Image: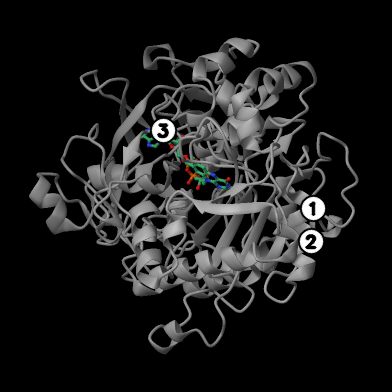
Amino acid sequence: MRLYNIVTGRGFWQVAFFAFQVKGAIFQSAKDLPTVDYDFIVIGGGNAGNVVVNRLTENPKINVLLIEAGPSNEGFTDAVIPFLCTMTAPDTAMDWNFTTTPQTALNGREIIYPRGHVLGGSTSINYMAHLRGTTSDWNRYASITGDNGWSWDSLQPYFRKLERWTPPVDGHNTTGQFDPTIHGTDGMLPISLPGFSQSIDDRIIETTKQLSNEFPFNEDMNSGNHLGIGWVQASINKGRRSSSATEYLSDQFIKRPNLHIIVNTRVTRLVKTSVQRGIPVFTTVEFTQSTDGPRSHLTAKKEIILSAGTVGTPHILLHSGIGDFSSLSKLGIAPLVNLPDVGKNLSDHPLLENSWLANSTNTFEAVARSPAMAMAEWNATQQGPLVDTVVNHLGWLRLPDNATIFEKFDDPSSGANTAHFEFLISNGLLSASIPSTGNFMSITTGVVSPVSRGSVTLATSNPFDSPLIDPGYLTSEFDLFTMKSAVRSAQRFLSAPIWNGYIIAPVNGLENTTTDAGLEAYIRANTVTIFHPVGTAAMSPRGSSHGVVDPDLLVKGVVGLRVVDLSVLPIVPAAHTQAPAYIIAERASDIIKAAWKL
Ligand SMILES: Cc1cc2nc3c(=O)[nH]c(=O)nc-3n(C[C@H](O)[C@H](O)[C@H](O)COP(=O)(O)OP(=O)(O)OC[C@H]3O[C@@H](n4cnc5c(N)ncnc54)[C@H](O)[C@@H]3O)c2cc1C
């Protein structure tokens, strides 16, 4: 979803934005790193990695090195002003700029596949919606792994420890828009409701009354039961993005003498350090600052923590000889640990933007066509249309119990309180080029309990070559059925009387979906990603022959190596994935501290 198509150009926003101070405590080059025996080396300063380095360095006796491939997050305007989130990727220095392999169920299209390449990782470039998932999502992880510590109830302390509930920047009365009893108030990450009222907000809420059976209002989607339509909660504080970099690596933490961070430095592989009772020890990391640059090595006294994300983590494991022996051998990589599931089992949410011409002059298009006013307001007061992400409301919805698809498929959702598809309701176009006239609204639909699975594999033995990312979108008939149902459901949403006279006509191909064949063609031609891949280093029970990590996140068959990021989730939750990544990392930090008696 790329709003930058509709603004007058990236240059305007950047010139108008005031300069940031650059922090000094981050090393730009390996040769500047002090000589220290690090207890832990964390790879990837992203969503999860920054949580771990923060929590481990709470103990002043523990030395931690964080290695991040991308630059510091400081100075990137688009990573600060929430509404500019759609400009953070692709084709920026903050993005790895991946694309997928040709997607067989999407007419062979290669899909743009952003991943954060910057301190804060994907939380520096994402759209900030904050969703915990449902009780049954987390209880399913507990059941799959055999570790009750991953259940919804067990994780409650971490949900609260993470959150710092924050009033919206416009100070409006939020009664009835969230449930204050279920939120943390003194945690690390500010979470708030929208701070700028959109002209369609009242109509959306009225729809939940006029069509309450199909679209009930849900006061708080983070209660464990997310079904219905409700207000989005987002990691935004006083009109600015909150990321794992702005919060977990804020000045007070980055100044800790026991934390060293090196940016613009890519880990190329892990090196077998020794063998302990017949098991290989992987506590040495190899890294470099350019394709042809010298490779440096450092060894952690205790552990390496791999937090390079669902694409980066399997990429590094495979280049280290940890993966499927026969595939590694074919590429000429010495196979060291046979873990066939590394890079397999990728699950993700496919996404489709559905748009209508609207009878309004007060939509995103109005902001995009006159950005100077909005930017001036944000610069002067940090108020106005730029203070929020690009949706004020989300919906989480299920297929009917008697849907014909259940004659062929078991229900893939984690339980009866968990959606099959999602609505993201926006006051304008998100991805298409904006015509010079016209105003729009969109209900973007996502398949959030998918059956399709994909993979991350290596294209070559060169760690600087991008991996082959195949999310397998809509390769399961179940997912195609769900996407069709989601589009039909969005059309029914707008059939509520409150939209009479507001919605003029479907656009961008949606007008060709009156037949089932037309709908299918439209879906295959336009589906993209909502950026939520998980599963490529999945947890499984201790001692299990499948999976990649044990429930304590230690890599199977190896000593000294743990994975802490979204790749460990065996199935994608019916949620946006930043909150799950934070939660995994908060619990993992306690697991690591307990293991080392810190
Ligand atoms: C454009 C976009 C929009 C999104 N919108 C939302 C949203 O609104 N709400 C939501 O909940 N989720 C959203 N997500 C998803 C969510 O942000 C991610 O799923 C989550 O942040 C991933 O966390 P992670 O810790 O697993 O990985 P990341 O945060 O991606 O961190 C991985 C880090 O490792 C680094 N790294 C990788 N390889 C190497 C290497 N070889 N050497 C050194 N460093 C390396 C990367 O540069 C990165 O900093 C979005 C994601 C994107 C990309």
Residue 255 seen by the camera: no
Instruction: Please indicate whether residue 179 sits to the left or right of residue 569 in the image.
Output: right
Dot 2, how many residues are within 10 Å of its Cα: few (below 14), some (14-19), or many (20+)?
some
Residue plotted at (43% across, 45% down): 309
SS category of the residue bearing label 2: helix
Q: Name which of mark 3 and mark 1 comes first in the sequence.
A: 3
Q: In which quarter of the image is residue 414?
A: bottom right
**548 is higher (above) or lower (below) than 267:** below
Mark 2 vs ligand 1: CB below 8 Å: no
Q: Mark 2 points at which residue?
A: 206
Dot 1, how many residues are within 10 Å of its Cα: few (below 14), some (14-19), or many (20+)?
few
Answer yes or no: do the residues labelled 3 and 1 have beta carbons within 8 Å? no
Q: Mark 1 points at which residue?
A: 202
Answer yes or no: do the residues labelled 2 and 1 have beta carbons within 8 Å? yes
The image shows residue 258 at horizontal and vertical percentages of 58, 26
The image shows residue 245 at horizontal and vertical percentages of 59, 31
Answer yes or no: do the residues labelled 3 and 2 have beta carbons within 8 Å? no
SS category of the residue bearing label 3: loop
Instruction: Please indicate whether residue 258 sits to the left or right of residue 251 in the image.
Output: left
Residue 500: mark in rendering: none
**Foreground: disc 3 or disc 2:** 2
Mark 1 vs ligand 1: CB below 8 Å: no
Q: Mark 3 points at which residue?
A: 90
Instruction: Please indicate whether residue 292 sits to the left or right of residue 312 in the image.
Output: left
Q: How far apart are marks 3 and 1 (CA)?
A: 33 Å
SS category of the residue bearing label 1: helix
Q: How far apart are marks 3 and 2 (CA)?
A: 36 Å
